[in-house]
Amino acid sequence: MEGQHAMNASVDIRSVSKSFGAVHALDQVSLSVAPGETLALLGHNGAGKTTLFRILLGFIAPDGGEAQIGGLEAGSRQARRMISYLPENVAFPKTLTGREVVELYAALKGVAKSEAGQALEKVGLGEAASRCCGTYSKGMRQRLGLAQAIVGSPGILLLDEPTSGLDPLSRQDFYQLIADLAGRGTAVLLSSHGLSELEARASRVAILRKGKLVADGPLGNLQRDARLPTRIRVKTAPADVETLHREFGGRRINGASVEVTCDPDEKMAILAAIHQRPGAIADIELIPPSLDEVYRHYSACEPGKEVRS
Ligand SMILES: Nc1ncnc2c1ncn2[C@@H]1O[C@H](COP(=O)(O)OP(=O)(O)O)[C@@H](O)[C@H]1O
Ligand SMILES: [Mg+2]
């Protein structure tokens, strides 16, 4: 297998359930990731994200349902060969250099050792490659974990909270790296505990709440289907603030603006009505719901509803 790269493969999870005693860590979860797709799996602590990864890796067996990697049963030897994994709390032997760590993983995967250098360059550890990883900062250790995961261009990449130790700038580099891999056909499944973390980088978003899948779709669809209110902020002459507030309601801000909250469907009609009324308008600002609000909506809604957009 030396130097052989994994083929494009997909992840398929059908009605997977897993309980630990009385805790339903996963309850009838169905999810798939196609080659070239990046799926972000979101959920609060304890939602079941890591359990799903461990099932895909074959570390634990589901109580019910099926998990397949490239059409093969999760955990089988061939299925495991297609997957690279970055665990939630990654730790490496402190006395090994960054290069030695990645070479070790390359050897375990049957990938040429020479690919370690490339992987380290890609994550920005080229310079630090010959230093003991015990001297690395948290962000550098996280990037080393990523180098270990991407060495050999895996068919499937499972990343459990990969951006948690990264500053915003390296987070951008991280998503660029993931996009490059996905562009070459890798199926990427990454977990995160907030939508705003993603910076709208994932092609699809799935949200787990207490073991149940409560949303699965492109981010735009999730935003639309959440039907969260948009805020319209109108800046006008102080004399007009009162009349505007009387006609449209909402709240007054600093005696200079009125902020009206409306349903997405009403937005255009309200804008037109504001435009037609007498009185000078200095500015109109539209404030759509934030990613945090969208995430809060789904992670708090009743399981079983709003699945698949
Ligand atoms: N080995 C285990 N033994 C007992 N309970 C577990 C075990 N693994 C996970 N759980 C429980 O299952 C639930 C889901 O955990 P986990 O998959 O780690 O969530 P997440 O990764 O989304 O934070 C939690 O309530 C957790 O305490
Ligand atoms: Mg976890």
Image (spheres, rainbow, N blue to C red):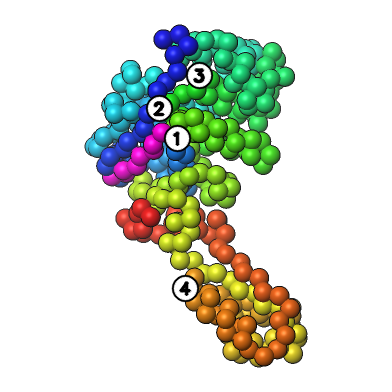
Mark 1 Cα shell of 10 Å, populated few (<14), some (14-19), many (≥20): many
> How far apart, in angstroms, are the residues tagged by discs 2 and 3?
13 Å
Placement of the N terminus among the 4 image quadrants: top left
Q: Residue at x 51, y 15 (%)?
A: 105
Helix, strand or loop for disc 3: loop
Lower position in the chain sequence, tag 2 or tag 3: 2
- Whether 281 is among the magenta residues is no
Give the label on residue 36, or none.
1
Numbered disc 4: secondary structure: helix
Tag 2 and tag 4, C-beta contact below 8 Å? no
> Which label sits in the foreground, 2 or 3?
2
Q: Position of residue 119 (x, y in %)?
A: 59, 21
The part of the image, by quadrant, that contains residue 274 is: bottom right
Q: Which mark is residue 265?
A: 4
Q: CA distance from mark 1 to mark 3?
A: 16 Å
- Tell me which label, 1 or 4, sits earlier in the chain: 1
x 31%, y 37%: residue: 13
Residue visible at 47% across and 39% down? 38
Q: Quadrant of residue 72?
A: top left
What residue range appears in magenta? 28-35
Q: Which residue is mark 3?
A: 152
